[in-house]
Image (cartoon, rainbow, N blue to C red):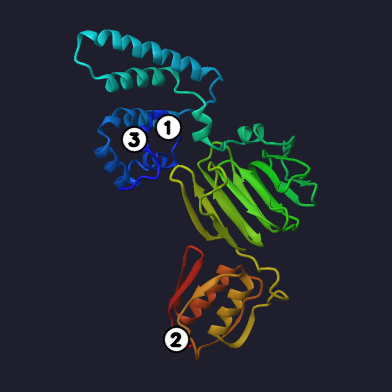
Amino acid sequence: MEMSKNYGDYNAEDFLRDERFRRWVASDGREEAVFWEDFKMRHPEKSGELTLARSLWASLNSLQEMPAPNVRERIWQHVGEATQDVTDTDDQRPARPLYRWWLAAAAILIIGGLAWTFYTTFREEPLVYRDQVAVAPVSLDEKINTTQKEQTITLADGSTVLLKPGSKLSYSGFSDSERVVYLDGEGYFDVAKNPSKPFIVYAGRIVVQVVGTSFRVSSNTGNVKSRVAVSSGKVKVFAAGKKGRAEEPVFLTPNQQVVFDAQAHVFAKSLVAQPVQVGGTGEPKEFDFTNTSVNAVLHTIETAYGVTIRHDNAAFASCNLTAPLGDMPMFRKLDIICQTIGATYEVFGTEIVISGGSCDL
């Protein structure tokens, strides 16, 4: 197997810096398995360095606090002393230098806190509101809603945020190429459209990016799950923690939401509980149908709410419906339609599937 890098010359620190190695250990050996098994067979002398690097990786990722700047120097000073002690002791024993060096280094690093400048590399972007605000590249203003009512905050670009009680928002004057805010809690955002300046919300474990739209974000520090629900426009949601947000985003359109489970690192996309009529589709629909084909009724609902309804067009081709559905919630409309034609519906993610039914009305 051809190697683009000279991994045979790597030490533990080099492996820790290598993206391919990090993917391997982060996936518990599931990714890049063929490459690293082959490498270990070709370079058995590197087993000690690999073991040390894997141990350091696991321990560094368990750290919860930022270490002091001089910790790395102290740790490696102790490592040097420990490895010297091991060397002196081993003068009277069969030599296993790599194993002994790893054992001493790993013990000191684990007990001593496992902290050095690699911490900032592997922790990447902070996942907690206070940490995110602390490392922001510009000076920020902070609003904390200490009242029992929602508060409206108007930002420099004309965007507004309806901040829930107990929630916090930090923001600047948006002088950079991006409009960035930081949220802890829940807020409803109505973003002024500006294609040249994306609007980005850092909300703990998720990042939301838009140009101009309306959406709700709920992400409290300490909670495992975060939620984004879209009222208008289009947004994309990332999992925080990756510099440059390299992971594939989840795209949301009106009446869609996503819940991010940080523990499982999984996005669950679905429809909001109460879809509303989507702007830009003309005058609001009245939904009063008289001898109207079921296919046309369902198409009207799809268009008005921006949803996808799967059904058998042929089965309802000659099926007409008379029903004053008015301003009932969308799912109540579907309840009445399905009860009338003897069908049922289920919601799968962001799609509604209607099955069964007949035209014996």
- Whether residue 185 is visible to the viewer of this picture, yes or no, is yes
Q: Label 2: which residue?
A: 315
The amino acid marked with disc number 3 is Gly
In this view, the residue in front, 43 or 262, is 43
Query: Label for residue 48?
Result: none
Q: Label 1: which residue?
A: 14
C-beta proximity under 8 Å, tags 3 and 2: no
Determine whether the residue tagged by mark 2 lies in a helix, strand or loop.
Answer: loop
| Residue 225, percent from left and from top | 52, 45
C-beta proximity under 8 Å, tags 2 and 1: no
Query: Label for residue 8?
Result: 3
Question: Quick check: 205 above or below 109?
Answer: below
| Residue 177, percent from left and from top | 72, 48
Determine whether the residue tagged by mark 1 lies in a helix, strand or loop.
Answer: helix
The amino acid marked with disc number 1 is Asp
* Mark 3 or 2, closer to the camera: 3
Q: On the image, which quarter does residue 166 sit in?
A: top right
In primary-sequence order, the first of circles 2 and 1 is 1
| Residue 325, percent from left and from top | 62, 76
Distance CA(mark 3)–CA(mark 2): 66 Å
In primary-sequence order, the first of circles 1 and 3 is 3
The amino acid marked with disc number 2 is Ala
